[in-house]
Every structure is written in C-alpha cells, then in structure tokens.
Image (cartoon, rainbow, N blue to C red):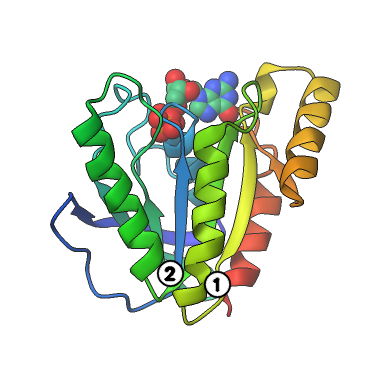
C-alpha cells in the first residue's frame, strides 16, 4: 500500500469550521454521484473510508480525512459536498456553494483540487464554474493550487470512446485529464503519483 494509514478526522457543515490547516491538503469535488467516494476509497486502498452510493445530495458537509504515505508524509484528504443535485432548494444550493467556495478560497494548505467528471457526461457548467473559481481563488492562496481533472467511470464505455471524451475535456480546459475507474483501478497509480508530487511541495 502507498497510503499506510487513513482515518476520518472531522466534518464541517455550513457555519462550522474545520480543524486548523496544519498539513498539505488534497480536495475532491464533483457533481453528486460522479464516483467521488469510490475514487477516494480506491486511492487510499480502503473499501469503506468514505461511504459510497449515498443518496444524491445527502453529503452536505466537508469531510476531512488524515492520511499517511508509506514514506511517512502526512496530508489531509478533503471530501467536498457533491454539487449539481437538482432536487435541492435554492437556499440549500447557496449554503453548499458558500461552504465549498469558503474552503477553496480560505484554506492556505490547499495543495491540489481534484475535479471529477463522469466520462459519459463530460464537462458541464458547474464544473467549468468551479475551475474558474479556483483559478481566481488561487491568487489569495500562499501556495499554488494544482488543478487535476479526472474522468471517472471509464470502465462504463469503450476505450476509444473514453479517449475521445477525455481528449475533448483536455482541449476545452487546456489541462491534462486522467482516466479513472474505481472498478478496474485504471488511473489510480497515475493520480497518486501526481498528487504525491504536489503534496511534497
Ligand atoms: P459520489 O456520490 O460522487 O461519492 O459517488 P459514489 O462513489 O458513491 O458512486 C456513485 C455510484 O457510481 C455508485 O453506485 C458506485 O458504485 C458507482 N461508481 C463509482 N465509481 C465507479 C466506477 O469507476 N465505475 C463504475 N462502473 N461505477 C462506479
């Protein structure tokens, strides 16, 4: 295992705060049901660190996990609430939006933001807005925030279809896109290597 220790540390709902920013953080964001919980579990090689298949829209808080790499480096994994869940009131959406934006803007230890996009849906308005928001928010961070785009559930479509979908995503964002599947483990090593490099500072 590349991550030898991982545990839940804290949760923050709108209006409450996370533990002090003491170490490099990797945050994960994406539309509800994009496969975010599964990806985090796959990354840390633990089946149940994050609960998967939860009712869309249920995760209304930021969850913070502590992890230790094999080489001893410690970091935080930040599970941001899924966005884009339609059956939510406007007030609720505003509260979650504020929660996510507050975290992204104010967290000085944020080293990387992983944005998950379902390979079958491609980039949507919410995703593009998030990318733009983080690019702007970076200005107030003390260290650059690496933006990593991951196409999820690539096992659901053929290899050539997923290649062209991710090529389109790469083209519209000007960024590299990692193909990922929690079912086959594709992309896990590549994503981890990238994140490890970023959290080394
Ligand atoms: P979250 O809401 O973004 O945290 O998404 P989950 O990780 O809970 O996954 C939502 C649904 O998609 C669940 O039914 C998962 O089993 C399924 N899922 C997640 N990742 C993959 C994947 O890589 N491949 C396939 N085929 N299904 C996935």
Q: Position of residue 76 (x, y in %)?
A: 39, 65
The answer to the question of whether label 2 and label 1 lie on touching residues, with beta carbons closer than 8 A, is yes
Quarter that holds the N terminus: bottom right
In the rendered structure, the answer to whether residue 81 lies left or right of residue 196 reads left
Q: Residue at x 72, y 17 (%)?
A: 157
Q: Is residue 170 above or below residue 92?
A: below
Q: Is residue 146 above or below residue 20?
A: above
Residue carrying label 1: 199
Q: Position of residue 155 (x, y in %)?
A: 68, 23
The total number of labels drawn is 2
Q: Position of residue 124 (x, y in %)?
A: 58, 31
The numbered mark, 2 or 1, whose residue comes first in the sequence reads: 2
Q: Secondary structure at mark 1?
A: helix
Residue nearer the viewer, 148 or 104: 104
Q: Residue at x 62, y 23 (%)?
A: 121
Cα gap from disc 2 to disc 1, whole angstroms:
8 Å
In the rendered structure, the answer to whether residue 109 lies left or right of residue 119 reads left
Residue 69 seen in this snapshot:
no
Residue 33 seen in this snapshot:
yes
Q: Residue at x 45, y 56 (%)?
A: 27
Image quarter for residue 177?
Answer: top right
Quarter that holds the C terminus: bottom right
Residue nearer the viewer, 24 or 91: 91
Q: Residues within 10 Å of mark 2 (few under 14, many from 20)?
A: many
Image quarter for residue 15?
Answer: bottom left
Q: Secondary structure at mark 2?
A: strand
Q: Which mark is residue 75?
A: 2
Q: Residue at x 73, y 37 (%)?
A: 169
């Amino acid at each position: 295992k590349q991550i030898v220790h991982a545990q839940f540390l804290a949760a923050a709902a709108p209006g409450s705060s996370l533990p002090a920013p003491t170490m490099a953080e990797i945050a994960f964001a994406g539309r509800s049901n994009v496969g975010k919980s599964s990806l985090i579990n796959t990354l840390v090689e633990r089946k149940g660190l994050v609960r998967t298949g939860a009712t869309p829209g249920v995760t209304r808080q930021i969850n913070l996990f502590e992890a230790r790499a094999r080489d001893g480096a410690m970091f935080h994994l930040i599970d941001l609430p899924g966005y884009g869940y339609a059956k939510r009131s406007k007030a609720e959406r505003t509260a979650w939006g504020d929660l996510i934006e507050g975290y992204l803007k104010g967290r000085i230890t944020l080293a990387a933001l992983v944005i998950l996009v379902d390979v079958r849906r491609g980039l949507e308005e919410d995703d593009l807005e998030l990318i733009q928001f983080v690019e702007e928010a970076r200005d107030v961070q003390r260290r650059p925030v690496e933006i990593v785009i991951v196409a999820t559930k690539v096992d659901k479509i053929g290899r050539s279809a997923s290649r062209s979908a991710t090529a389109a995503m790469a083209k519209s964002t000007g960024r590299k896109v990692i193909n990922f599947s929690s079912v086959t483990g594709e992309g896990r090593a590549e994503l981890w290597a990238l994140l490890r490099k970023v959290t080394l500072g």
